[in-house]
Image (cartoon, rainbow, N blue to C red):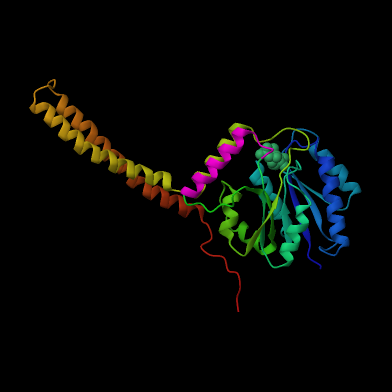
Amino acid sequence: MSDVLTIVVPCYNEEEVLPETIARLTDLTKAMIQERLISEQSTILLVDDGSKDKTWELIEQFSQTNPLIHGLKLSRNAGHQNALMAGLTVAVESADLLVSIDADLQDDCNCIRSFVEEYHKGFDIVYGVRSNRDSDTFFKRNTALAFYQLMKKLGVDMVYNHADFRLMSKRAVEALCQFDEVNLFLRGLVPLVGFSSTQVTYARAERFAGTSKYPFKKMLKFALEGITSFSVKPLRLITSLGCTISFISILAALYALISKLFGSTVQGWTSLILSIWFLGGLQLIGMGILGEYIGKLYQEVKHRPKFIIEKKL
Ligand code: UDP
Ligand code: MG
């Protein structure tokens, strides 16, 4: 086979783990080239996401002695998703199939071989799906689960227990590049690309070395990114809330009037309480209507492709 593979690895302050990552990916790539699974033009593209440690120096050093290693340095820390997208955008020009994997060796790189085999069977996208979350803390495991369930409720199509470890064909990455939104949440975007896809499961390990570059605050931001980039349902929630409050205002009106009839109220209370409920409901409905239009605007400015063509005859 002569298909060129590029493995894209975003790296942010990964000096501790990088030599091992490079060694493992190199061995794997060489083996696959020898088995003629991929072309000998295949490469490993390390994207330095504005690291403050020796990550870039290491990439430079390795690229001098190891012809498989290519490097890309971002001018500042742009974040995992942007770094990954930068790598994919650059690599897609010369690659036929692209694999993205984190630098920390949590994902089993030997799976890449299965990814490539699935690609040769004709799949455009192969998702790496973790079979367990044993390496996660109780907290991370449960918040992740809650997040996936919430996204499902919000109508976002996501692959359960899949992070950014996946294979994409050239045309799938080219299609992905047509989504030119600024707030990237690749896990949600890739399923929108379409084409045929399959999954490969693997056991996710602990980080090989170094510490997580996703502290709780960043994780929360990322989750919110996912929700607000893919769903306008939270805006719609305001309308439902407004309708509920308006309905309650009718009940409150009855209660207030009855209380007044039986004379157990202070002067002015009835009109005050009625206005509060009624106007509150009205305002929420008004905000909900505005929300509908803002949601539309939001979807328009994202300028997502309306369709992606798979074949022409
Ligand atoms: N990463 C990056 N830019 C960032 C944060 C992280 O390129 O701003 C990279 C990091 O080097 C790693 C991957 O994204 O290759 C995933 O990060 P990490 O393993 O720390 O996240 P976790 O697995 O703890 O969620
Ligand atoms: Mg990790």
**Residue 250 horizontal/vertical position (percent):** 19, 38
Task: Give residue 30's quadrant in the image.
Answer: bottom right
**What is the quadrant of residue 48 in the picture?**
top right
Quadrant that contains the C terminus: bottom right
Q: Is residue 150 magenta?
A: yes
Q: Nearer the viewer, residue 169 or 87?
A: 169
Q: Residue shown at 51%/56% (left/top)?
A: 303
Q: Residue furthest right?
A: 65
Residue in the picture at 78% in, 35% down: 209
Q: Position of residue 188 (x, y in %)?
A: 57, 51
Relative to 193, 117 lies left or right: right
Q: Nearer the viewer, residue 143 or 294?
A: 143
Q: Is residue 33 left or right of residue 114?
A: right
The residue range painted magenta reads 134-153
Q: State the image quarter where residue 141 is shown.
A: top right
- 138 versus 24 height, above or below: above
| Residue at 45% over, 50% down | 298
User: Is the stretch drawn in magenta largely helix, strand or loop?
Assistant: helix
Q: Quadrant of the N terminus?
A: bottom right
Q: Is residue 301 magenta?
A: no
